[in-house]
Image (cartoon, rainbow, N blue to C red):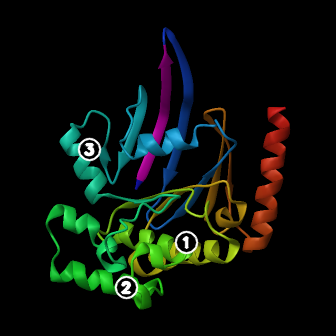
């Protein structure tokens, strides 16, 4: 599904280049739920921005659904973002003047392609994520957890190959965080969704199939979940502690 190979990205300040990603390799299989964790400055956001085609990279390849992204025109990249990727952001990015149902349909509205099939999918997503009762309300009238579940539903309206989630539980309490993560699980189970999530939240990451620890622009370690969620979270926290010790 997603293949990242030998990815390098630097930022230029004056005459000096600052490397941020230093040969990152990773894969995400179809219907897999994968998280990336790491300290601030480790390259998590840059990695997500490269995959989402928002920033260019100097070296390496990113292949999504058999299509290599490097070298595509702006028009082709916009098509990838709109049709093959779904996005979930920390601060929801809902439009205040639209209802919850309309917010879910926004990608189709932008395309001018609000078909009966799309409207039915929106209704199915409202039910799947237990937000049908707020379908005609506006973002200011609902909770943070409900806003984020709306954002997850919106990310699925085009049935993308991959959902990119950037700190989706960062602004939520533990109860709302669990509801959002369960929304991802429901999307995976019922819609064959594939999710790639950047997070600082070990609780959220413990629901994933794999967690990639990123440090100083490189993959430090990858952990696969082979036990119950709570035990996996403990192992994850231990690995993060070990990584912090290695940094020092």
Q: Is residue 148 left or right of residue 199?
A: left
Callout 2: 10 Å neighbours few (<14), some, many (20+)?
Answer: some
Question: Which of the two marks, 3 or 1, is nearer to us in this view?
Answer: 1
Which numbered disc, 1 or 2, marks the residue that appears first in the sequence?
A: 2
C-alpha span from label 3 to label 1: 31 Å
Dot 1 falls on a residue whose secondary structure is helix
Gap in angstroms between the C-alphas marked 2 and 3: 31 Å
| Mark 1 closeness class: few <14, some 14–19, many ≥20 residues within 10 Å | some
Magenta region's main secondary structure?
strand
Q: Position of residue 212 (x, y in %)?
A: 63, 50
Question: Splitting the image into 4 quarters, where does residue 177 fall?
Answer: bottom right
Question: Which residues are the magenta region?
Answer: 2-13
Disc assigned to residue 144: 1
Disc 1 to disc 2, C-alpha distance: 15 Å
Write down the residue under mark 2: 135
Where, quadrant-wise, is the C terminus in this rendering? top right
Tell me which corner region of the image, top left, top right, bottom left or bottom right, holds residue 153. bottom left
Question: Where does residue 236 sit, x and y in percent of width and height?
Answer: 76, 57
Read off the residue under disc 3: 77
């Amino acid at each position: 599904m997603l293949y990242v190979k030998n990815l390098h990205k630097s930022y230029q300040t004056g005459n000096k280049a600052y490397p941020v990603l230093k040969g990152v390799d990773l894969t995400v299989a179809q219907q897999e739920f994968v998280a990336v964790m790491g300290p601030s400055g480790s390259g998590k956001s840059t990695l997500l921005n490269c995959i989402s085609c928002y920033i260019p990279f100097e070296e390496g390849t990113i292949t999504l659904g058999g299509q290599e992204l490097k070298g595509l025109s702006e028009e082709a990249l916009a098509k990838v973002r709109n049709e093959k990727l779904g996005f979930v952001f920390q601060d929801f990015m809902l439009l205040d003047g639209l209802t919850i149902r309309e917010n879910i349909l926004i990608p189709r509205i932008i395309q001018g392609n609000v078909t009966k099939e799309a409207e039915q999918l929106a209704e199915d997503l409202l039910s799947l994520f237990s937000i049908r009762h707020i379908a005609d309300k506006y973002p200011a009238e609902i909770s943070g957890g409900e806003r984020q579940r709306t954002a997850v539903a919106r990310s699925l309206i085009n049935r993308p190959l991959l959902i990119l989630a950037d700190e989706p539980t960062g602004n939520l309490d533990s109860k709302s965080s669990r509801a959002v993560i369960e929304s991802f699980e429901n999307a995976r189970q019922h819609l064959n969704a594939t999710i790639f999530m950047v997070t600082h939240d070990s609780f959220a990451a413990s629901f994933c199939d794999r967690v990639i620890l990123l440090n100083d622009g490189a993959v430090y370690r990858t952990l696969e979940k082979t036990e119950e969620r709570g035990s996996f979270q403990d192992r994850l926290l231990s690995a993060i502690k070990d990584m912090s010790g290695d940094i020092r």
